[in-house]
Image: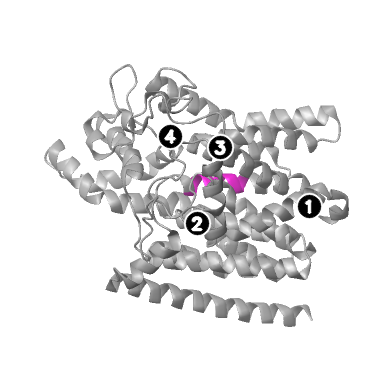
């Protein structure tokens, strides 16, 4: 039976217009060793170590490995990160940890082995919990596009945008949590398009459990769920199903925060490491304001280090396109489900994340290759690109190609060189410095491999498109 199911899956995979790009993404994620682990993923790893060794969430024994901690009134140290990636990693980590520490004579040796294996384990978790599920989700998304009669060219471009053309894709094989947040956010969009509101609620709950900022999607999603209903009874049923889907993650969220920080909805920001707190400088916990800063907003949109126009300009094009599509929805009747679901979710989700990011003292995200606090919503824009591409004028379609391809090029350069882009760096200048000023053989070898792999995938794409065209004819 399972052989038949495997064969059926293989047939569907071969028929998917974007499988070659998904395979490329998976292969590159596994083979390109640019995994930059620092205090952020180390905080999650500290919790995993504490669970394995001490059967506790307190990282007292491992706090020295990371500055990303919170210390509530009980005096213990805890990770200051949203717990979703860590909790989901536990069943994958425990067997590996058991192998790592096997036959160690005492705790000191066990912890020494864990530290030695830390980067490899974090890479394994990123591939297992982010890269593989995200690749499969993009396959499902492109299959959904194909079922709706989307052209092959639109699907190819959407796949490139989702897999290679945004900050979330750059972070997908690093266990920072942003890759997982992008995964669940895209899953919400797909579930809403298919009108599976219970699944949408589940993914929303997991999204919030993974990234606190995703809670801001609530005022966007709830009206969308209500609008899917035919009458008020249907709307209430859909809303109840959405809430039921998110109940499990909500209970896990409440239990974790009550255990660590004293209240079911008490966030670690309240007990943040003082080094991250601007005393008297921010309205909430010394970290975030209630009103966005215009200079920060300008830097996020047009800055040379984190600006959208320099990292993923196609998103700015789509913001204008989506806003026009929602405004003139009558002329988009054939895409009405997309106008009611994916497009407003992309626009509304971006708006709330942008508002939050522009109000945050650490808006730049520290060492990262783009605006990582906005990154969760970018794959949804890529999905929406596929839904609207065929309805756009030729000039806009050309503009999307011209703005997606440089973002893919940036992906190649950053993965080949140094993804550790500091806040003071101009991102393209940093890429140039990595290769021409600080060039290393390893960077050139990775660049050669990336260019070769993209070249092979492009040839496969052209051959498959021609064959599909001949079959259709």
Tell me where residue 162 sits by quadrant.
Answer: bottom right
- Kindly check if marks 2 and 3 are in contact, taking CB atoms under 8 A apart as contact: no
- The reply to whether the C-beta atoms of the residues labelled 1 and 2 are less than 8 Å apart is no
Q: Residue at x 43, y 67 (%)?
A: 413
- Residue 83: give its label: 4
Q: Tell me which label, 1 or 4, sits earlier in the chain.
A: 4
Q: Which residues are magenta?
A: 179-187
Instruction: State how far apart marks 4 and 3 are (Cα).
Output: 13 Å
From the viewer's perspective, is 68 left or right of 110? right
Cα distance in 3D space between marks 1 and 2: 26 Å
Q: CA distance from mark 2 to mark 4?
A: 21 Å
In the drawing, what numbered circle is on residue 214? Answer: 3
Q: Nearer the viewer, mark 1 or mark 2?
A: 1
Query: 10 Å neighbourhood of mark 4: few (<14), some, or many (≥20)?
Result: many
**Would residue 8 be seen by someone viewing this image from the given angle?**
no
Q: Position of residue 452 (x, y in %)?
A: 45, 78
- Residue 260 in sight from this viewpoint: yes
Determine the residue positioned at 32% across, 24% down. 71
Is 246 covered by the magenta stretch?
Answer: no
**Residue 243 shown left or right of residue 311 in the figure:** right
């Amino acid at each position: 039976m399972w052989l038949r199911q495997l064969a059926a899956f293989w047939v569907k995979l071969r028929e998917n217009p974007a499988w070659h790009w998904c395979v490329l993404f998976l292969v590159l994620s596994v083979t390109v060793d640019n995994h930059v682990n620092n205090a952020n993923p180390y905080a999650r790893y500290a919790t995993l170590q504490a669970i394995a060794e001490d059967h506790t969430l307190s990282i007292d024994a491992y706090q020295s490995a990371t500055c990303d901690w919170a210390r509530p009134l009980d005096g213990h140290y805890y990770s200051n990160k949203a717990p979703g990636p860590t909790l989901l990693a536990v069943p994958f980590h425990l067997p590996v940890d058991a192998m790592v520490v096997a036959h160690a004579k005492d705790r000191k040796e066990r912890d020494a082995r864990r530290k030695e294996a830390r980067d490899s384990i974090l890479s394994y978790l990123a591939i297992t919990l982010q890269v593989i599920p995200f690749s499969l989700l993009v396959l499902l998304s492109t299959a959904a596009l194909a079922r709706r009669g989307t052209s092959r060219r639109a699907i190819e471009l959407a796949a490139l945008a989702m897999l290679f053309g945004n900050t979330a894709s750059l972070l997908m094989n690093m266990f920072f949590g942003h890759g997982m947040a992008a995964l669940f956010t895209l899953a919400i969009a797909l579930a809403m398009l298919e009108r599976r509101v219970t699944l949408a609620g589940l993914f929303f709950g997991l999204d919030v459990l993974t990234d606190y900022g995703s809670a801001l999607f609530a005022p966007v999603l709830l009206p969308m769920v209500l609008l899917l209903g035919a009458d008020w009874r249907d709307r209430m049923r859909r809303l109840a199903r959405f809430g039921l889907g998110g109940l499990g993650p909500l209970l896990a969220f409440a239990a974790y925060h009550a255990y660590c920080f004293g209240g079911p909805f008490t966030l670690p920001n309240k007990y943040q490491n003082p080094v991250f707190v601007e005393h008297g400088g921010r309205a909430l916990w010394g970290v975030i304001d209630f009103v966005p800063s215009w200079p920060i907003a300008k830097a996020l949109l047009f800055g040379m280090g984190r600006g959208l126009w320099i990292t993923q300009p196609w998103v700015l094009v789509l913001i204008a396109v989506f806003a026009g599509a929602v405004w003139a929805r009558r002329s988009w009747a054939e895409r009405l489900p997309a106008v009611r679901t994916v497009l407003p979710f992309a626009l509304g989700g971006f708006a709330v994340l942008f508002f939050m990011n522009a109000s945050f003292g650490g808006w730049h995200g520290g060492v990262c290759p783009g605006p990582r606090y906005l990154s969760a919503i970018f794959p949804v824009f890529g999905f929406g690109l596929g839904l609207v591409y065929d309805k756009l004028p030729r000039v806009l379609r050309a503009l999307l190609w011209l703005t997606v391809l440089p973002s893919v090029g940036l992906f190649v350069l950053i993965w080949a060189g140094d993804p550790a882009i500091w806040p003071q760096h101009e991102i393209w200048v940093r890429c140039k410095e990595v290769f021409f000023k600080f060039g290393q053989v390893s960077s050139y070898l990775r660049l050669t491999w990336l260019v070769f792999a993209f070249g092979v995938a492009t040839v496969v794409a052209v051959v498959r498109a021609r064959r599909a065209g001949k079959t259709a004819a």
